[in-house]
Image (cartoon, grey):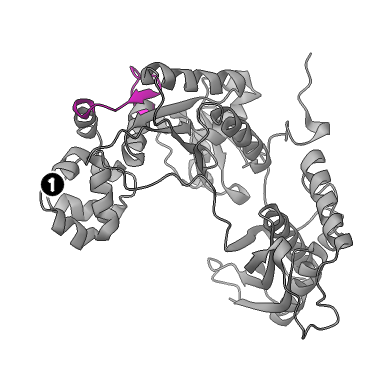
Amino acid sequence: MKTNQVVALVDCNAFFCSCERLFRPELRNRPVGVLSNNDGCFISRTNELKALGVSMGAPYFKVKELCQKHNVAVFSSNFALYTNLSDRVMSVLSRFTPVIEVYSVDEAFLDLTGLQVDFNEYAREIRDTVEREVGIPVSVGIAPTKTLSKLANHIGKKSKKAKGAVVLLEERLQNIALKQVEVEDIWGVGRKSAVKLRGLGIKNAFDFKSYHNTFQIQKIFTKLGRMTQDELRGIPCYELSVFGEKKKEIMCSRSFGNPVTSLRELRESIANFATNASEKMRKQKSSCAVIEVFCRSNPFSLNDEQYGASSYQKVLTPTNDTRKIIKYAWNVLDELFRMGILYKKAGVSLSSFECEGELQPSLFNHDEEIKDDEKSLRLMEVIDKINSREGANTIHSMACGVDKKAWAMKREKLSPRYLTGWNQLPVAK
């Protein structure tokens, strides 16, 4: 049964690259790419870079000469900058509707149901407002379902005529659009599923919508495949998740820029990971009862001894105090550490969450496992506020180290923080 639901998907174009271009007007028509952690692979590319044949996930070292030949601007990932600009984009979008689902750092679904507006003009207004007030170009797709709005957005990015704004509220327009979208480009259809669909003679989104044997679709692709087919038919199956669910696990891990051999350096890295994970946990007003640590060597280095291990510590009374979490993580690490190993990656995972204000102290606590008191909670709150205002790690535990960290990520092409560091603000001349 058709409904009158109207959903918009707003997606930032080559978001990480657009963030880098924002403060460098000279990069406007130049190919730009952003690399993953340790400057490994491309995770964001402008259209100019795509035109050179550089694919998503391509290792930088393999295309380095090509990038130099064509004067490609390559950057290390600057997630502090990207997150700040993402928050600004979402703030602007929230003015267009009270119901918004932040789907990812560069995407959001907006519920426009019931608005008495010209949706073609509204889509262009959303696009223009975000670019004018934040400086980030976006594409807008409007349709009756989330899947159709994804397809509308996909066409908006590809079509020069659409200029980033496509509305598919009429079935006639939906059918025209669905015939242009390959089955691999349907939201929720993976590579293996696409192969199976093509085996049924389904080559594009319109074929999928029109396929008559719905029982076979559900049998092969389970209920989710059937729901996707209904969404293509304009029948909403996926609701907007307005209130983001709290995470059940928070992990922070990194590959090291250089191999780590000493326990001291490994402890510093674990302290930093525990600090970052604790901040994220406090942001969702949670406390954890399980602290897990892992470390491993480089699996691709065949000449070195291979080693990988993980373990955890469970506490009777949940905590969100960074100092305690570092201590527990170190207890686990000391048991895992082996001399003579070239460690390439480590991480900390926090889980078994309870709401911050609803903790029940255990009767069987060890002396050090007391409930976080008011003084501890206030200290963590003040540290989080200062780090949010002045920049990450402005205040941190001495356990995290004070000198240049040998284990830190390789970020040789890192841009300034611009928006999250006073000493890196752009200067007008």
Residue occupying the point 79% across, 21% down: 427
Residue 348 seen in the current view: no
Magenta residues (range) = 157-173
Q: Is residue 122 above or below residue 175?
A: above
Q: Is residue 188 above or below residue 177?
A: below
Q: Nearer the viewer, residue 283 or 128?
A: 283
Which quadrant of the figure contains the C terminus? top right
Q: Residue furthest top?
A: 429
Decide if residue 362 is on the left or right side of residue 199.
right
Q: Is the residue marked by circle 1 packed among few (<14), some (14-19), or many (20+) residues within 10 Å?
A: some
The image position of residue 356, as x and y in percent, is 71, 61
Look at the image and say whether residue 147 sits in the magenta stretch.
no
Q: Is residue 286 above or below residue 234?
A: below
Which quadrant of the figure contains the N terminus? top left
Q: Which residue is mark 1?
A: 211
Picture quarter containing residue 377? bottom right
The image position of residue 32, as x and y in percent, is 54, 30
Q: Nearer the viewer, residue 196 or 290?
A: 290
The image position of residue 48, as x and y in percent, is 45, 27
Residue 94 seen in the current view: yes
The image position of residue 36, as x and y in percent, is 57, 47
